Amino acid sequence: MIERIVPLHIGSVDISYTNSALLMTIAVVLITLLLMVGTRRRALVPSRLQSVAELAYEFIAGMVDENIGHEGIEYFPLVFSIFMFVLFGNVLGLIPYSFTFTSHIIVTFALALFVFLLVTLVAFARHGIHFFGFFFPPGAPVFMAPILVPIEIVSYLSRPVSLSIRLFANMMAGHTMMAVFAGFTITLGLFGFFPILINVALFALEVIVTALQAYVFTILTCLYLRDAVHLH
Amino acid sequence: MPPPSGLGAGFRIGIELLASLIVGLALGWMADRFLGVRPWGLVVGFFVGAAAGMVNVFREAQGLGRGGPRQGG
């Protein structure tokens, strides 16, 4: 549940500092700490923290290089930030009594919309008016355009929606499932032992899902960027 | 990279279908509201959204055998 930690109102707009915002702050601070402390020593034989920082860097750098190409490395900071933010948001939400900000659709939709607008801007900046050719599949007969172009436009506009629903639904479903089984534990009394066992298994599954969904969100960002850079 | 699971692929494709439908309906609804072409915006929007969903599903499914989703025009 969203709780207002520091109530703040400007006019009729509620911009209170909520527990969701608190978790976002914690995520950003932790990411910064991990990378700052991890890269401070720059040892040839890396410490554990340095290994983690390097692993994250190598992973995303490889993904960007593979999916966008060599010129895609200029988008690396963005892709890396998105990956770390979503990953930390998902993982921090697994800690009992904390809050998963990625399980709220407004947060994931804002992230996805940001990616979408950026991708569109990049496509416009790189290709200018040719960008509109994206909405007409090459090789299709011209008289099909009145049908094909709206479909392609809707298909393009559905990207941020599917991107945000995917992340939100996965995080939401996992948490709801765990809450339902935790509820069984209370109602079953003595036999509440069995739902606990299921919850232990579910928790392991959730750990995978958190990493997987951060990965999916990031790789789709990469694929959209590739579309914008290369266009067809 | 984690191994691709059948459930994940199904979930992804289902969401793809739903998202396009939502966008199509939203656009149609807005056309109704602001252009005053009620009820044709919603009708056309529904079909265009459904068609776009099918296109997205098709594209997604094309990339299934080759590991990883591929979006392309």
Image: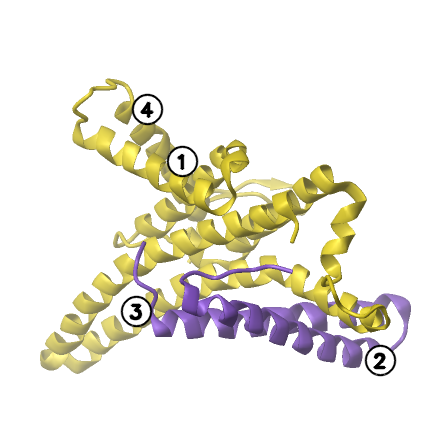
Chain colours: A yellow, B purple
Q: Amino acid at mark 3?
A: Ala
Q: Are marks 1 and 3 in contact (CB under 8 Å)?
A: no
| Mark 2 neighbour class, 10 Å CA radius: few under 14, some 14 to 19, many 20 or more | some
Work out whether residue A158 or residue B70 is closer to the camera in this orientation and state it. Answer: B70
Disc 3 chain ID: A
Reading the chain from its start, which is encountered first: label 3 or label 4?
4
A219 to B33, vertically: above or below? above
> Residue flagged by tag 1: what amino acid is it?
Val
Q: Where in the figure is residue A222, as x and y percent of width and height?
A: 51, 47
Amino acid found under the numbered disc labelled 2: Trp
* Badge number at residue A28: 1
Q: CA distance from mark 1 to mark 4?
A: 12 Å
Q: Say if residue A90 shows up in the picture.
A: yes
Q: What is the distance, in whole Å, between disc 1 and disc 3 at their CAs?
A: 27 Å
Residue A47 at what x, y percent from top left?
Answer: 17, 27
Q: Position of residue A30 (x, y in %)?
A: 33, 34
Q: Secondary structure at mark 3?
A: helix
Residue furthest right as drawn: B36
Nearest to viewer (mark 3 / mark 4): 4
Dot 1 lies on which element? Answer: helix
Residue located farthest toward the front when viewing the structure as drawn: A139
Q: State left or right for residue B52 relative to residue A188.
A: right
As drawn, the label of residue A192 is none
Q: Quadrant of the image for the C terminus of chain B? A: bottom right
Residue beneath disc 3: A179
Graded by Cα atoms within 10 Å as few (under 14), some (14 to 19) or many (20 or more), the crowding at tag 4 reads: some
Taking the spot 46% from the left edge, 61% from the top edge, the residue there is: A168
Q: Which residue is mark 4?
A: A36
Residue drawn at 43 percent across, 56 percent down: A216
The residue sitting at 89% across, 75% down in the picture is: B37
* Real-space CA distance between mark 4 and mark 2, rounded to the nearest whole angstrom: 57 Å
Q: Look at mark 2 in the image and give the residue it sits on.
A: B40
